[in-house]
Amino acid sequence: MESIGTNVTKHTTRVVSALTARTQLGAIMQRARDNQERFIVDRRGEPQVVILSVEDYFRNVVKEPQSLARLQAEARQRGLDKFPMSAIDREIRRIRKVRQRGV
């Protein structure tokens, strides 16, 4: 079985076999998330998929629409980017309840 090492610098891309990805998926996911490592999974020597963290994906792959970037900058200026997820979830639940009653 192929083993995945732990001494890797940030944004290192490793090629792992499909078998290794299958048997060590939890460890690969953790390393992608915690260390921003990237993995190319190959099958029979052919690259098939890439595994990377969601943060890495959004930062480096997805291009932000200009309007979203503008909204995020405005939220930062007004201090609105500091809301904890629990407060956001509560507000979403509250709005959904209000909408359900109104229908």
Image: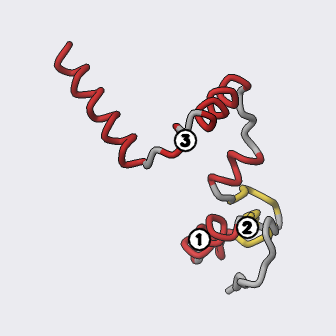
Q: Residue furthest front?
A: 78
Q: Is residue 79 left or right of residue 16?
A: left
Is 41 rendered above or below residue 95?
A: below
Q: Is residue 82 or residue 14 the one in the foreground? A: 82
Give the residue at mark 3. 81
Give the number of marks.
3
Residue identified by numbered label 2: 37
Are dots 1 and 3 in contact, CB under 8 Å? Answer: no
Task: Tell me the kind of residue under disc 1.
Answer: Gln
* Mark seen at residue 30: 1
Q: Nearer the viewer, residue 45 or 21?
A: 21
Which residue occupies 76% across, 63% down?
A: 40
The residue located at (51%, 46%) in the rendering is 82
- How far apart, in angstroms, are the residues tagged by discs 1 and 3? 26 Å
Callout in the foreground (1, 3):
3
Q: Residues under labels 2 and 3: Cα distance? A: 27 Å
Asked where in the image residue 88 lies, by quadrant, the reply is: top left
Identify which amino acid the numbered label 3 is placed on: Asp
Q: Position of residue 1 (x, y in %)?
A: 67, 86
Residue at image point 68% right, 23% down:
67
- Would you identify the image quadrant in which residue 9 lies? bottom right
Distance from the alpha carbon under mark 2 to that under mark 1: 9 Å
> Left of 30 or right of it: where is 84?
left
| Mark identifier at residue 10 | none
4 to 74, vertically: above or below: below
Question: Is the residue under label 1 in contact with that under label 2 (CB below 8 Å)?
Answer: no
Residue 79 image offset from top left, x and y in percent: 55, 39
